Image (cartoon, rainbow, N blue to C red):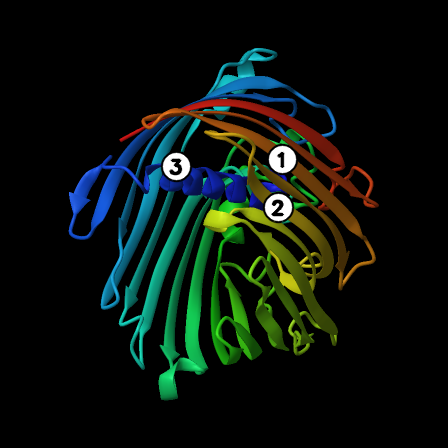
Amino acid sequence: MPPSGARAKLAVAAAALSLAGQALAAGDNGFKVGDGRLHLYFDLQGEYNSNVLYTTSRVPDLILHFRPGLMLNVPGRDVALDLSGNVAWNQYLGVSSSATKDLSFLSAAADLTLGFNRGGTVGLELSDSFQRSNQITSLSLASAAITNNNVLRLAIPIRPGGGALELKIGGQWQVQSFEPFLDAGATCDPVANPSCNPANLNLYGYNQLTGAAEVRWFFLPRTAVLVQGSYFARIPNDETVSLPISGYKVWAGAAGLVTPHIAGTLKGGYGNSLGSAGVPFGTWLANAEAEYLITGGIGVKLGYLHDYQADVGTVYSLYAFHRIYLEGKVPLVSHFTVRGGGQLEWDQYVLIDQPTQVANANLWFDWEVIRYVILSAGYQFTWRTSTVPAGPVPPVYSYNVNQVFLQARFIY
């Protein structure tokens, strides 16, 4: 199973897009589209991965990533558009084992956001995010896999009386499916655990529907007290291998600027799965976050989150977690930027007493050589430990992964 540190890796990719966007903001690169610009880019990235199979018996390899992509930003108060996307061929070179060449695959990512009437009393926000990757966020899937994950979001902000009070109602539809990445039968027992059989991976797909509402009162121009509520329902493709999980979450607190350079979030609440996993489960929720802002939105963020999450599978289908996270991006000198972050997470399953810990950290250096070329070097470490011994049931893995990246981005 690929590490749950994928969330941090996706954040690194997003930061790379943000960096390139900022580098181009003041120039005439790209093709003019209305009031915005379309930028095309190509990433050539080399990667050393110490554990491409994500198992206790580590198999290292070198990987080449060929990634063409685009970014389009069209600002506007009536209609605003943001679009980014890429397709990548990931070629495993088979340095330590020729068998790893068979892991080569095509990945893709796309994000689209449409905003309507953002300055008006009633607006509309529509977004869609797609990811095809071997980076699985599921903790319970006992097989390395490729995932196709699509999330469609809709929100209607209502700002009566000049905008001091904002009501937002909306929803989310997530569809996720899985495909074989490797023959996981070598790492666990496919008879005792069906998810070890690549032929059964498609059974673990699901739809998840979420409805949400939020009220914010801005007692200062950029600081608000808030109340949030949501209800979700996960609908598995096959209920014999995954439980249908549903529940609600309610939050209350405050968020916004404390000073011109310090922003914060402090909120708490309660969540309950309504017995959907077969046993009563409810837990407190908390999120505390502090961020130091520098010019251009660059800064450092530190936070803590306690929440609960649904997952694929049966006895591992519901867990609560504590997470500490850190992320930042700071300019060193002209044309040089350092960015990175990490998180440490403690997970406790509801239906079985098997805690798991996951940690990851990443550090990147970016150098804008010229307006059209950005060179980057990065390192990422992922670590996972579980009290579950190696055996036929997930999650069986206690492992670590070291990844080193060198990348050249050519952008117009």
Label 3 and label 2: CA atoms lie apart by 18 Å
Residue to which mark 1 is pinned: 362
- In the image, is residue 223 above or below residue 87? below
Q: Specify the farthest residue to the bottom.
A: 161
Position of the N terminus, as image quadrant, is top right
Secondary element at tag 2? strand
Q: In this rendering, which labeled residue sits more in front, label 3 or label 1?
A: 3
Q: Position of residue 380 (x, y in %)?
A: 63, 31
Query: Residue visible at 48% across and 71% down?
Result: 210
77 or 251: nearer the viewer: 77
Residue 103 coordinates in the image, percent (x, y) = 50, 25
Residue located 51% across and 52% down the image: 203
Q: Which mark is residue 20?
A: 3
Relative to 289, is 389 above or below?
A: above
Residue 327, disc:
2
Quadrant location of residue 22? Answer: top left
Residue at position x 61%, y 74% from top?
A: 254
Can residue 266 be seen here? The reply is: yes
Single out the mark in the foreground, 2 or 1.
Answer: 2
Quarter holding the C terminus is: top left
Amino acid under disc 1: Asn
Kind of element beneath mark 3: helix
Percent coordinates x, y for residue 248 in the rendering: 60, 76
What amino acid does circle 3 point to?
Ala
In the rendered structure, which amino acid carries the disc numbered 2?
A: Glu
Residue in view at x 66 percent, y 48 percent:
326
Q: Is residue 237 above or below residue 13?
A: below
Question: What separation in Å lies between label 3 and label 1 (alpha carbons)?
Answer: 19 Å
- Give the SS element for disc 1: strand
- Out of 298 and 148, give the one closest to the viewer: 298
